[in-house]
Image (spheres, rainbow, N blue to C red):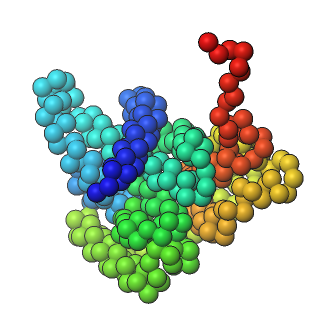
Amino acid sequence: MPPSFWLRWRQLLLVYLFAVGTVAGSAYTMYVHYDFSHSLDTRSYLGVARGEFRGNSVTRRYRVLVPAAAAAVAWPLERIYAHIWPQRATSDWALRLAFYLVNTLLLAATGVVIFQTCLLYGATPTAALLGMVAVLTSRWAVYLAGLPLVDSLYMLVFALAFYAARSGSSLALVACILLGPHAKESFVFLAPWLLLFSQRAVRWPWQLLWLVASGLLAYAVRHWVDQQAGAEAQASVQNAFSHFENVSYSLHRLFSLKGVGEIFSIFGFFSLVLLLGARGSWAQIRSWLQPLGWASAGLGLVVVVHMLLSSELARMGYLFSPVFAVAFSLILTRHPSFRWLQSPPRTNPENRG
């Protein structure tokens, strides 16, 4: 391997450690202080991690990858807890800690993929890093990393999809396809976007074969889970179609004052950078808007579908993170409002020794 290869991976490792540090601190507070008594989602995923499928939520019991990873991490943690905190050894503390660790590492990996994508779109390393920070400091990053949830893996799937479309990486695309159906069933709405915009990575006939193979694997997992749960397969199909009942409620909520506040809260005051980017001449706006292209608009449409089918608009809107980070970093790189960030500071000759 050439020295430049190792230098590149050392740099990415530093970015990854930076991403871990960005997520871990605030998410730890969520992990320690969250009240689980009223959260059906977290109790469901804790049950899946313990192998308790019978009576568990039809919506969540098939998303086994993150709970399985958390269960594997929890096994040695339980031995440590038994020696240090005997009173916690028989509780969920070790498993909750394992979810926190797994989700933090997955979200940090998502951050690195987003950082790389920003660079591919032409952002400077500084702007790409700030774009990553804007995403990883969202209130939803804190929520998804600190709690026993599986959204972190789905975030990684979306980041890999957007990266593969830009870079032409077949490895990223195949990983996205194989992980997607096990992360969330709504991956089915991302699949057409992959076929349309990821031709550079894998041509559509081969993509279709990978999608079929991944779908068969997902079906096998679902069949096994149904056997453990003692449930019929059509129950999950009926549950999937029942999500269309949320569309009317989601639309009403989206176009309300509360809905606007929810959307703004996804990235908070970092969203104001996009408003600054919309200032100036059309040429200045086009300098960062045009590179986003139809792939970004298409991914935004996929996210909107997720939002409408879910009753949690902001949580699903967070899936737009890869596009938001790229737009954010391109504005910092190219818009005149941030020219001071784009060039190194000048040294005043009078201040030289």
Residue 26 lies, with reference to residue 328, above or below; the image says: above
Q: Is residue 239 left or right of residue 66?
A: right
Does residue 66 appear in the picture of this structure?
yes
Residue ID at (78%, 40%): 337
- Residue 208: % across, % down: 43, 83
Q: In this view, does 87 lie to the left or right of 207?
A: left
Residue ID at (41%, 71%): 170
- Please state which of residues 45 and 290 is positioned toward the viewer in this rendering: 290
In the image, farthest residue toward the bottom: 205
Does residue 58 appear in the picture of this structure?
no
Quarter of the picture containing the N terminus is: bottom left
Residue 250 lies, with reference to residue 268, above or below; the image says: below
Residue ID at (22%, 42%): 74
Residue 328 lies, with reference to residue 24, above or below; the image says: below
Quarter of the picture containing the C terminus is: top right
What is the count of numbered marks? 0
- Residue 21: % across, % down: 42, 34
- Residue 32: % across, % down: 38, 29
